[in-house]
Image: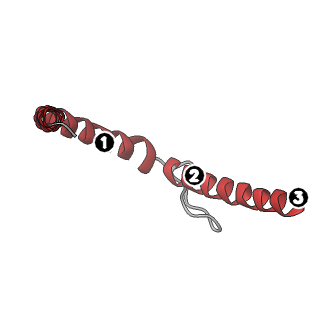
Amino acid sequence: MEATCIYVIAAGGIFTILFLLTLRPHFVQFIDYLVLWQSRYLTYPQILRRHSLLGPWTPAGFVLHTAYIAANVSCLEFWRLTTTK
């Protein structure tokens, strides 16, 4: 590798670090907004209130359980398709 390529890579790394350091306050504000939004719309409201058999369902819990069931069904279906060939 030539010396100029090494200098260009080092300069690019330094500029990238400086660019990321200037964006850090905006990134922190975005993360704070995202946490508040997630708490307001996904964690606190309940789809299904307290029930005798099922606990309270939040939108986040509903999405996680649905994704878990979908992943298990797709794995079972994939296993069934690969064993029949």
**Drawn side of residue 46 relative to residue 1, left or right:** right
- Which quadrant of the figure contains the N terminus? top left
Bin the neighbour count of mark 3 within 10 Å (Cα to Cα): few under 14, some 14-19, many 20 and up: few
Is residue 47 depicted above or below 30 in this figure? below
Is residue 70 depicted above or below 40 in this figure? below
**Drawn side of residue 32 relative to residue 45, left or right:** left
Disc on res. 50: none
- The earlier-in-sequence mark between 1 and 3 is 1
The mark closer to the camera, 3 or 2, is 3
Judging by the rendered image, the residue that carries numbered circle 2 is: 62
Residue type indicated by callout 3: Lys
Residue at 11 percent across and 37 percent down: it is 14
The secondary structure type at the circle numbered 2 is helix
- The earlier-in-sequence mark between 3 and 2 is 2
Alpha carbon of mark 3 to alpha carbon of mark 2: how far? Answer: 35 Å
Residue type indicated by callout 1: Leu
Bin the neighbour count of mark 1 within 10 Å (Cα to Cα): few under 14, some 14-19, many 20 and up: few
The mark closer to the camera, 1 or 3, is 3
Judging by the rendered image, the residue that carries numbered circle 1 is: 36
Q: Answer yes or no: do the residues labelled 1 and 3 have beta carbons within 8 Å?
A: no
Residue at 73 percent across and 57 percent down: it is 73
Q: In the depicted view, which residue is nearer to us: 45 or 24?
A: 24
Residue type indicated by callout 2: Phe
Q: In the depicted view, which residue is nearer to us: 48 or 84?
A: 84
Q: Position of residue 69 (x, y in %)?
A: 67, 57
Disc on res. 85: 3
Q: Position of residue 22 (x, y in %)?
A: 11, 32
